[in-house]
């Protein structure tokens, strides 16, 4: 609409927001920041996008109130209702199987809703557990709509945002050096996106590529280039918003830790989009795995229970990333990689023992092999992340 | 159950789950300090802790917010210590 992410207008707006938040206190700061966030969403998505965002936030707040006081089943129902409304509003591709076109919401601007969903669900679950003792009505709307993390995260936890907003914890030290570092971080993020990312994109896989027509060398280059393009683009964006958040006093969590150095696929997800991985671990993997292990069927089969939980978690991750079949396959591929890794690890531990295996993995050949396999496995999964539905369908037909 | 009994029993659970009798715990101990403590063993550990402390059941929100062994001990003491 009127503003693009990481454009000079965005940076100008961020400078205004930093001054506003840093120079005001009390209700002026709270209401001023909320006004800035709403204005940003309007400028980014237009009136329909803003209306969708406010509707979903309001629904989330209402269902959270129900979730906190309701019986166990009503609480599950309220969370499920929120997810169903999310699926409907995002107009998932598979809805075409059940709904006529007239009943679908393909005209909605729903950018940012995926992150909004996970923020709302996290507050719901933690508040019901008593971990969040009170949802502060003066903090919650800004937590949901903060412009810096609205569109692409990182997914900050409510307690972390609240404590920084209330100055109970400091985003960064109040020194010249810390503020300079935050400024340089923004600059470095822009270099990653606009200089390195733009350069790499020239070699990267495009959405409508006929993969089967490529030579092996071309395929490899485009896939690896796309992997690094995504990394530069997303981690560069995170650098910018972490820098902006630091200067505003509400610093989001770190989201990347050199994922190309990961030595296995589980390690990869702790280095890539880390805030999402931790969310999925806490609210999908842990409860599913715990439930499975506590059941009589899987109590003696921890490996199988772990694989099922990992597969389900990656399926949710895939569907969360996007609405088309490619994202579903992206999730399934990562679930498969995790399953293979866990089984392989289990076999190696049984054969070599933990100590010997640890020693092999710590050696430089062990590390290089682990990194190379992980990088290529992750890059391959991104194939389905990038291709549009007709190209994915053509690829699958060609392979079968 | 006193706090020191909680620490004693918890240490024994950690030693059983990670099959390592040399594990010692402090409030600052995190998953980084114990080599095999990953997302899989974390849940196995919590189930073993729930078994070791009758009546204890961690909710999803609580599990999500345990940052270190100190948090774990506080959560246990809140429920079972007298």
Image: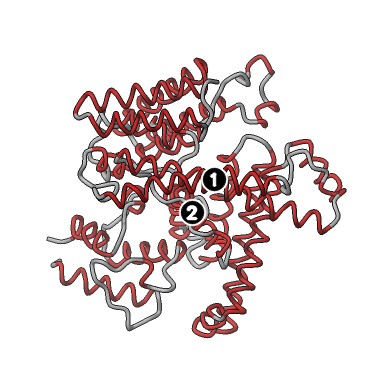
Residue A68's quadrant in the figure? top left
- Give the vertical position of A339 relative to A200 (above or below): below
- Labelled disc at residue A65: none
Left or right: A146 with respect to A208? Answer: left
Q: Secondary structure at mark 2?
A: loop
The spot of residue A32 in percent (x, y) is: 29, 23
Q: At x 35% / y 48%, what residue is drawn?
A: A180
Which residue in the protein does label 1 denote? A234
How was this image coloured? secondary structure
Q: At x 75% / y 56%, what residue is drawn?
A: A221
Question: Which comes sooner in the sequence, label 2 or label 1?
Answer: 1
> A171 or A308, which lies in front?
A171
Label 2 is found on which chain of the structure? Answer: A
Left or right: A350 with respect to B1? Answer: right
Q: At x 58% / y 74%, what residue is drawn?
A: A367
The spot of residue A137 in percent (x, y) is: 26, 28
Q: Is residue B18 visible?
A: yes
Q: Is residue A74 visible?
A: no
Q: At x 63% / y 61%, what residue is drawn?
A: A375
Which residue in the protein does label 2 denote? A256
Left or right: A343 with respect to B55? Answer: right
> A399 or A270, which lies in front?
A270
The spot of residue A227 in percent (x, y) is: 64, 52
C-beta proximity under 8 Å, tags 2 and 1: yes
* Mark 2 neighbour density, 10 Å: few (under 14) some (14–19) many (20 or more): many
């Amino acid at each position: 609409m009127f503003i693009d992410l990481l454009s000079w207008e965005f940076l100008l707006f961020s400078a205004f927001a930093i001054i506003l938040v840093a120079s005001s206190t009390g209700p002026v700061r709270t209401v001023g920041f909320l006004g800035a966030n709403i204005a940003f969403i309007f400028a980014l998505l237009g009136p329909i996008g803003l209306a969708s965002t406010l509707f979903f936030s309001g629904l989330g707040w209402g269902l959270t109130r129900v979730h906190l006081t309701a019986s166990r089943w009503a609480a599950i129902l309220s969370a499920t209702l929120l997810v169903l409304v999310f699926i409907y509003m995002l107009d998932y591709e598979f809805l075409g199987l059940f709904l006529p076109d007239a009943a679908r919401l393909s005209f909605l601007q729903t950018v940012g809703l995926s992150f909004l969903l996970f923020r709302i669900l996290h507050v719901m679950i933690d508040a019901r557990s008593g971990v969040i003792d009170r949802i502060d009505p003066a903090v919650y709307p800004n937590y949901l709509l903060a412009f810096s993390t609205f569109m692409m995260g990182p997914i900050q936890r409510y307690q972390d945002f609240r404590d920084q907003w209330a100055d109970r914890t400091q985003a960064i030290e109040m020194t010249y050096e810390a503020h300079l570092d935050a400024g340089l971080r923004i600059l470095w993020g822009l270099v990653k996106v606009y200089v390195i990312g733009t350069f790499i994109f020239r070699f990267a896989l495009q959405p409508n590529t006929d993969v089967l027509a490529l030579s092996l060398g071309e395929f490899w280059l485009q896939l690896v280039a796309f992997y690094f393009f995504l990394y530069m683009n997303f981690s560069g964006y995170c650098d910018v918003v972490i820098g902006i958040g630091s200067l505003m006093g509400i610093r989001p969590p770190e989201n990347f830790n050199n994922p190309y150095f990961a030595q296995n696929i589980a390690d990869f997800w702790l280095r890539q989009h880390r805030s999402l991985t931790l969310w999925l671990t806490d609210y999908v993997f842990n409860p599913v795995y715990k439930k499975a292990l506590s059941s009589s069927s899987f109590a003696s089969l921890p490996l199988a229970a772990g694989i099922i939980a990992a597969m389900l978690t990656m399926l949710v991750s895939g569907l969360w990333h996007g609405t088309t079949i490619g994202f579903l396959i992206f999730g399934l591929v990562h679930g498969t990689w995790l399953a293979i890794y866990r089984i392989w690890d289990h076999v190696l531990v049984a054969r070599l023992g933990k100590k010997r295996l640890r020693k092999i993995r710590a050696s430089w050949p062990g590390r290089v092999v682990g990194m190379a396999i992980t990088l290529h496995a992750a890059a391959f999964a991104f194939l389905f992340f990038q291709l549009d539905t007709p190209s994915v369908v053509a690829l699958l037909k060609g392979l079968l | 159950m006193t706090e020191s009994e909680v620490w004693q029993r918890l240490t024994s659970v950690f030693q059983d789950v990670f099959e390592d009798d040399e594990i010692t715990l402090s409030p600052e101990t995190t998953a980084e300090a114990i080599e095999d403590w990953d997302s899989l063993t974390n849940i196995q550990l919590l189930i073993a802790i729930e078994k070791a402390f009758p009546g204890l059941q961690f909710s999803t929100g609580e599990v999500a917010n345990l940052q270190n062994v100190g948090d774990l001990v506080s959560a246990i003491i809140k429920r079972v210590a007298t």
